[in-house]
Image (spheres, grey):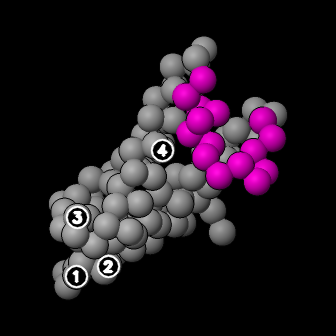
Amino acid sequence: MTGNEFIELAARLVATRMADEASMCTAIGRAYYGAFHLATSFLNELGFATVGHSEPHQFLAEPGNAKAKHAGIILAELQSARIKADYRLDFVRAGSQPFAKQQVECAFRL
């Protein structure tokens, strides 16, 4: 299982013709977790000990590497969207196909 597989699942959920709110919220979560695993893998390759660390975007946000910083910003935005999709049922936008699609596209850019 890879982070890319989570993101690909999210893309399939978003592309579904009968995309309901629950599917869109699930797609947002899968996009975030796919990106999370990609970022964690990247950091581990660089020698950072991320095991047990729940927020790799904090490592990525450190100054010095513009690409890593950009990835950290994307991951933080994806996490924010995931929290809204999972915990804020009144955040209607999270259940919309355009918003979910935007999150999946962000995850693919990571």
Disc 1 marks which residue? Answer: 20
Determine which quarter of the picture holds residue 57: top right
User: What amino acid does circle 4 point to?
Assistant: Leu
Of the numbered discs 3 and 1, the one sitting upstream in the chain is 1
Q: Quadrant of the N terminus?
A: bottom right
Of the numbered discs 3 and 4, the one sitting upstream in the chain is 4
User: What amino acid does circle 1 point to?
Assistant: Asp
User: What amino acid does circle 2 point to?
Assistant: Ser
Q: Position of residue 27 (x, y in %)?
A: 37, 69
The CA distance from mark 3 to mark 1 is: 15 Å
Front: mark 3 or 1:
3
Determine which quarter of the picture holds residue 22: bottom left
Lateral position of residue 107 relative to residue 38, left or right: left
Looking at this view, is 30 or 4 the one in front? 30
Q: Are marks 1 and 2 in contact (CB under 8 Å)?
A: yes
Farthest-out residue, bottom: 18
The CA distance from mark 4 to mark 1 is: 24 Å
Lateral position of residue 6 relative to residue 14, left or right: right
The CA distance from mark 3 to mark 2 is: 15 Å
Query: Residue at the location (24% across, 78% down)?
Result: 21
Front: mark 3 or 4:
3
Identify the secondary structure beneath mark 4: helix
Asked if residue 47 is positioned above or below residue 80 in the image, the reply reads above
From which residue to which does the magenta span run? 48-62
Identify the secondary structure beneath mark 3: loop
Farthest-out residue, top: 64
The CA distance from mark 3 to mark 4 is: 20 Å
Asked if residue 22 is positioned above or below residue 97 in the image, the reply reads below
Q: What kind of secondary structure does the magenta stretch mostly adopt?
A: loop
User: What amino acid does circle 3 point to?
Assistant: Phe
